[in-house]
Image: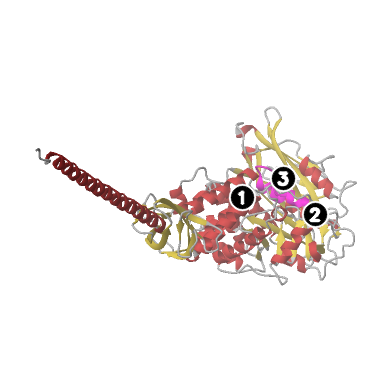
Amino acid sequence: MSSPALVLLSQTPWVTPGQSFDLDLRASTNVPVSRLGVAVSVYPCLSSVSGFDQSVNTGPTGAPVSSTTSPVALGGLPAVAGGGVHLSLPVVVGGAGSGAGSPGTPFIIRLQAVAGQCGLFPAGVFPVRLQLVDTSGGSVLGSFTTHLVYTEATSTTQKLRVAVVLPVQLTQRAARSPSPAALLARPTAALTTPPAAAVSAVAGVVSAVAAHPTVPVTLQVSGQTVGLLAGGPHASALTQLGQLAATPSVHQLTSAPFAPVDAAALVGAGLSSELTLQVSRGLEVVSGATGRPVPVTAGGLGAWVTGDTLDAATVAVLAGNGFRQVVLPASDLTSAPADGSTTQPFQLNGARGTEVEAMASNDDLTARFTSAPGDPVLAAHQLVAELALLYYERPNGVSPRAVLAVAPTSWKDDPAFVDALLGSLDGNPVVQAVTTSQAFALFPAPSACRTSCRLTGAIGTGLPAAAIRAQRARIAGFANATVGARTVAQGLGDLVLGGESRALRPSQQAAVVANAGLALDAQLGQLAVEGDQTVTLTSSSGPVPVTLYSDAAYPVTATLVLSSDKLLFPNGKTQWSAGVVLQPHHSTVVPVRVRTRTSGVFRLDVSLRSPDGTLRLVTGQLAVRSTSSSLVGIVLTVGAIAVLAIWWFRTSLRRRRARRAEESGDGSGDAGVGAAAGGTGSAPGP
């Protein structure tokens, strides 16, 4: 953002009779200083908030009551730190003249009574228009409108109370392609580191608050921001936060979530449990960093302060988490009890018959935080001037009146704004700073709301709800398996909480949650099952050694699950499980006896799960080769051999009988032939 040509460095927050209106200005232009001048115009005091808005947004209207006749030469003004000049303008009520002063006092502001201005003249809020002019041609190079607050209030005046709520918050986006090694060494590598200027600004806001120790203020400190401040060049900011937390009557730290979230969006997405985790984790981190518990007020966690819309369901969830008070934008309500432009506590109804005490923050005051881009000091003084105008709306009343100025969600922590704002509230004669809890306590009882005070905002649910649930379940399973690694599990859970930040777009939220999953994967990558191994069994049953490795620095308690379609485990089934404990940097061998039904090579699936069964830590496979024969095979083989033996034996007997019969038949035939031949041949002749 480019700097405006004319910037306000400081000014007198209020003017009393006889006091001058002093301003420190800085010009940013290429025009030589010798040609620069400042024209000043003071307009009638304002009588309405709408008139104030117009003076800020489009500039004051009507004729000035006092103005310079010619620009005051910039080169003739005293120099101040920061490259600026000091302009001192005496203030006189009434009197004649053009307003021209002496050479040492170039211009006198003369407050003139004119028709239509504030009813308590000269006390009131006067718009002051300053223009940076190129005197060589009269062109206006830059301008702004601030306000002169003139007061004659006494010390006993019933002041307007204002509770200023400032965020101490940083947002982290997803890192691009973080490596498993980086995530393993530091899970927060899943997130980008905010720019150094942003971290310095947050630390500067804390220092600015500490620089005004007597000015009450309410701080919304996120746990995620505390982690970013710790251990770096801005660690002193945590010490200051601890000192501020030690004075709860002046510096109230709200029960802020771990990351700034849209509560209604979480509840609307079915993530009420995440809202509960946001609150509990935020309290834990901030309390640990400051060394002091966040004060609990009104019997609960104090006030939930938001600039987002709420619905009845969310109010009920907040009440269930312990919040008894809510601060929400006036624009989120049909109407609310008020005293003029100020607010009062009222009962806000939630779902299921729940009730909380509520106050509406002032939308106009919220807008002042960003009303002067590039000129935070001017924005702060415009806010204080509007507070003075609200006081003059009903000055020095009998009953206390209060407003709440809550920084918008789009506001970036700005030390210059905070320093100017709190400095202008320190000792202010018509405005008194209070904490949020003190604002509620000003009123003895909440006002009645019969048909009004209804919530009107539409709730958006752009959160990546399914991804958040999935990663939360995985992290819960990891925590269940790694009881001794609570810090690691918390760090992984914090990544999911950071992904719920309302400062991120839905796509950015999804990217952070996805990186949380990668960070968990890096932890699980330290576990392994011995794979690509074949175990040979020479009998129908035998032990199979399952080897598990852990390079983690913490013990892992898990359930070992084995399954196979072809193997039977000790329980007689094809699936078996048992509890195991993996020691840090150690391998664990679990022998499991299996039984095969036949010979062959069979796959054995190995899975290591968290004890609650919700997370699969690691998986692997083994191969089991069986070289033994089964009983059926043996019986069949023996039977075949027996049949073959019987067949061979019977066949052998037949052959022997046949051979003998053949041999016996051949011998009898030869003897008969011989006898017959001999008988014939022996017959004698005569």
The answer to which image quadrant residue 400 occupies is: bottom right
Span colored in magenta? 363-382
Give the image location of residue 56, x and y in percent: 76, 44
Could you tell me how far apart the alpha carbons at marks 3 and 1 are, in whole angstroms? 38 Å
Q: Which residue is tagged 2?
A: 330
Dominant secondary structure (helix, strand or loop) of the stretch shown in magenta:
helix
Let me know if residue 251 appears in the view: yes
Q: Residue at x 85, y 50 (%)?
A: 48
The disc placed on residue 467 is 1
Could you tell me how far apart the alpha carbons at marks 3 and 2 are, in whole angstroms? 19 Å
**Which numbered disc, 1 or 2, marks the residue that appears first in the sequence?**
2
Could you tell me how far apart the alpha carbons at marks 1 and 2 are, in whole angstroms? 34 Å
Left or right relative to 23: residue 566? left
Q: Residue at x 76, y 69 (%)?
A: 441
Q: Residue at x 62, y 54 (%)?
A: 469
Q: Which residue is tagged 3?
A: 371
Give the image location of residue 645, x and y in percent: 32, 53
Query: How packed is label 1: few (under 14 Cα within 10 Å), some, or many (20 or more)?
Result: some
**Which numbered disc, 3 or 1, marks the residue that appears first in the sequence?**
3
Number of numbered discs visible in the structure rendering: 3
The answer to which image quadrant residue 164 occupies is: bottom right
**Which numbered disc, 3 or 2, marks the residue that appears first in the sequence?**
2
